[in-house]
Image: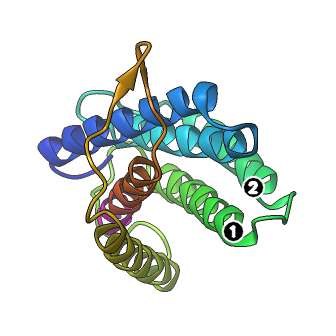
Amino acid sequence: MHGPPLAGWLLVALCVTVGAYCLHRTAVAAPNQRRAAGQDALMGIGMAAMAVPASVFAPRPWTTGVYAVVFAAAAVYAVLPLRHAALHLHHAVGALAMVYMALAAGAAGPHARHTGMGVPLLTGALLAYYLVYVLRSGVRLVAAGGGAGPVTVSSGRLRERAELVAGCRVAMGVGMFVMLLGM
């Protein structure tokens, strides 16, 4: 990530934590929720990898292509089943935003400044999407979480709770907004 190293490391910590929880969800979620959990885990871990400060790990020239292929495949995978169109569309937008950021960063070069990368209109549209998504989802989360109670651990496993899943998605939305803002 181009920008202040502290911001990059905070974003890495947030995304690794969310990605790890979502990866855990793939094992404990109901079968109909595993696909979404896997997509959330890929986004969280992928965002963490992309957010590592460039001063610590300068991306190799081939990493742009790897990110682009992985997240393009994730976008296609997200929209194939249209049973839950809104969630899958959100995953597709996220994956395509990751492709866009990888290609923009690759085109700018490994030592480019964080300003001026990408297409301003597309970056602005993605920023607006994530701002609305985070605010809308955050308000729903706060409204629904009034009497939620504590998160419990049973048999060494963190139980899947709707509030945690929604909170993870809000956190990743904030992370995506920050990454786009840093372009």
Residue 37 x/y as whole percent: 60, 42
For the residues marked 1 and 2, what is the alpha-carbon distance in whole angstroms? Answer: 7 Å
| 172 relative to 55, above or below | below
For the residue marked with disc 1, what is the amino acid? Leu
Residue drawn 49% across and 83% down? 125
Residue 174 x/y as whole percent: 33, 62
The residue most toward the top is 155
Which color scheme does this rendered protein use? rainbow
Circle 1 crowding by C-alpha within 10 Å: few under 14, some 14–19, many from 20: some
For the residue marked with disc 2, what is the amino acid? Ala
Residue 50: which numbered mark, if any?
Answer: none
Residue 177 x/y as whole percent: 36, 66
Residue 117 x/y as whole percent: 41, 66
Can see residue 54?
Answer: no
| 107 relative to 155, above or below | below
- Say which element carries label 2: helix
| Quarter of the image where one finds residue 180 | bottom left
Is 136 part of what is drawn in magenta? no
Residue 89: which numbered mark, if any?
Answer: 1
Can see residue 160?
Answer: yes
**Which residue in the protein does label 2 denote?**
78
- Say which element carries label 1: helix
Residue drawn 32% across and 77% down? 139
Callout 1–callout 2 Cβ contact below 8 Å: yes
Magenta stretch secondary structure, dominant: helix
| Quarter of the image where one finds residue 182 | bottom left
Circle 2 crowding by C-alpha within 10 Å: few under 14, some 14–19, many from 20: many
Which image quarter is the C terminus in? bottom left
How many dots with numbers?
2
Residue range corresponding to the magenta coloring: 177-183
